[in-house]
Structures are given as structure tokens and as C-alpha cells.
Amino acid sequence: MKTESLPEYRSGFIAIMGRPNVGKSTLINALLGQKVAAVSPRPQTTRRRQLGILTLPQAQMVFIDTPGVHNPRHKLGERMNAEALQALQHSDLIAFIVDGSQAPIDEDLLLTGILKRLGTPEKIVIILNKIDQIDASTIITRQAAYLEMLPGAIIIPISATRGDGLTELVQTFIQHLPEGAPFYPEQQVTDLYERQIASDLIREACLVFLREEIPHGIAVRVDEYQERGEEGAYIEATIFVERESHKGITIGQGGVMLRKIGSAARKEIEAMSGRKVYLQLRVKVRKNWRDDDKAIQQLFNN
């Protein structure tokens, strides 16, 4: 039976919103059952809007993984905020994900203010993430605090890493999506090409291995992505940093750090693509690229 013929089939776009590093990309990967979004312990891992598509017999949910909304210090940050806010305005539901392991902070208040101005509390689902790190009484306290901030919203406690509450969350999404045919083929799980996902996974590896002062000044450009049949895929990529000192740190003594980054990224790309990958990395300096409109445009189109 084709899903298009079902009279009550539901489909729609769900914007995943939250401050940096609350688990937005982790949640999308958990819902899809595979890795399509880069994840690291560092804030601002996600820089561009991307879709994660979950197709079930009764519904298709198109999740919009947005960059974390924050106070920007560069043109790059302004672009990331604009991407996130545009997604909110054009979505059927807004999934506002918060870190349940800590009380609401100023950034959460900033975001709830944005959501209030949209004037549609009935389309907001608050996702209280990381409940595996707190006890039952604290979960109740956190729920009350966020519902006071966003009256009329729905709240669902989950643990994206353990999978707790995900079934209830999916059912809540389905109940509140409009009726309609699916937007994408059943087998499609993202709108990004493998080349773009590879770029994100290389940058993710950089964020994992490098020191605090470097990550936000790192960009990755895939220069070549060749399919070589049974031999797998050959990828050449450039890691851009803003300072000569950062180039040295990224390469490491004798190239040790760059090899670590390459090995970790290659394993993630192989897991994503299901084929053997040959990955060649180089490092270049591009000063102040985060305030360079041309460089930012190249990043978002890579």
C-alpha cells in the first residue's frame, strides 16, 4: 500500500531549536537510527541547516537540525542565527530541546522570548533532554520551570543518548502534524549529499581532538570526492584555520594530530557511507574567515 493513499497520513516539518550543545543533533541521529548530523562535546557543532527524515507507515517527520541560537560575535554567527530563525518561521512544529541536567539559564530565557514572540504555543514541544543525569523529583521541577516560561506548550522528558522517552516523543509529533502526503521518498534520510556529510564529520573530528581555543575558527572544504567502485571512495579535504599557530596545533608534532583527526573522520565516513574510504587531509590558514562573506558562503555551499 502506498502511503500517499492513506487518508490520515500525516507529514510536516519539525524545527529542532535550542541553545548550543543541548543535544539537538544527537536527538536527530537517535530518532533516525543512524548518524546524519555531526555531534561533539563542543558548542556550535552544527553550522548549517540540514534535514533528517523519518518515514513511518503512518507519518513522515522532516526534522530541521538548526545551528544553536546564540549571541553572535562574527558574521558566521549572524548567518547561523538567521538559518535557525528562518526554520522556526516555516515549520509545522517547533521542538525546543533543553538540558534537563541544569536549571534554565539566560540563553534559555532568550530562546523562550523568541518563541513567545512567534505567538504559537500550541506548536511548541519542549524536550527535556538528559534526564538520565537527574532524579525523578528534579525532572518534575525542571518541567514546571519550563512550562511556566512557555505556558500552553507540551513537554516530554527524554534521554537522547539512552533512548528514554523517544517513542512517546514520536507519537506526540505525529498527533500534532497536519494530514498530508510525504515530502520525500521513503528511503531518504537527509537532504545533504555524502560530500557534505563527510565535511561535517571531518570538522566533528577536529572539535573532538583540538583544544578549546581552536574549534570555532575551523572550517572544512571537501576538494575531491571520487567514487572508485569496489575500491571505495577517495576524499581530499582542506581544514582551514585562522592563525599560523592553530595550523601547527592542528597538524601536531610530526603530523600526529592530523593523523588522529583523519583516522577518526575516516571511520565515521565509512560507517555513514557503508564503503571503504581513503581520506587525505591538509591544513591551510585563512585569516578572519568568519567575518568574510565570501568564505562563509563557500562554507554553507560546500
Image: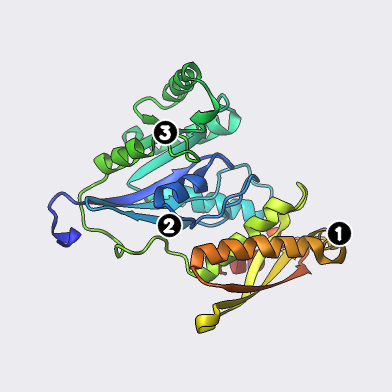
For the question of whether residue 292 can be seen, the reply is: no
Name the residue tied to disc 2: 51
Secondary structure of residue under mark 3? strand
In the image, residue 98 above or below residue 137? below
- At 53% from the left and 24% from the top, the residue drawn is 134
Disc 3 to disc 2: CB gap under 8 Å: no
Count the numbered circles shown. 3
- At 27% from the left and 45% from the top, the residue drawn is 177
Q: Gap between marks 1 and 3, in whole Å? A: 42 Å
The one of 99 and 152 positioned closer to us in this rendering: 99
Q: What residue type is labelled 2?
A: Leu
Side of 201 where 84 appears, left or right? left
- Residue 175 is situated, as x and y percent measured from the top left of the image, at 25, 40
In the image, residue 135 above or below residue 299? above
Quadrant where the C terminus sits is bottom right
For the question of whether residue 53 can be seen, the reply is: yes
The one of 262 and 121 positioned closer to us in this rendering: 262
Name the residue tied to disc 1: 245
Quadrant where the N terminus sits is bottom left
Q: Which amino acid does label 3 sit on?
A: Ile
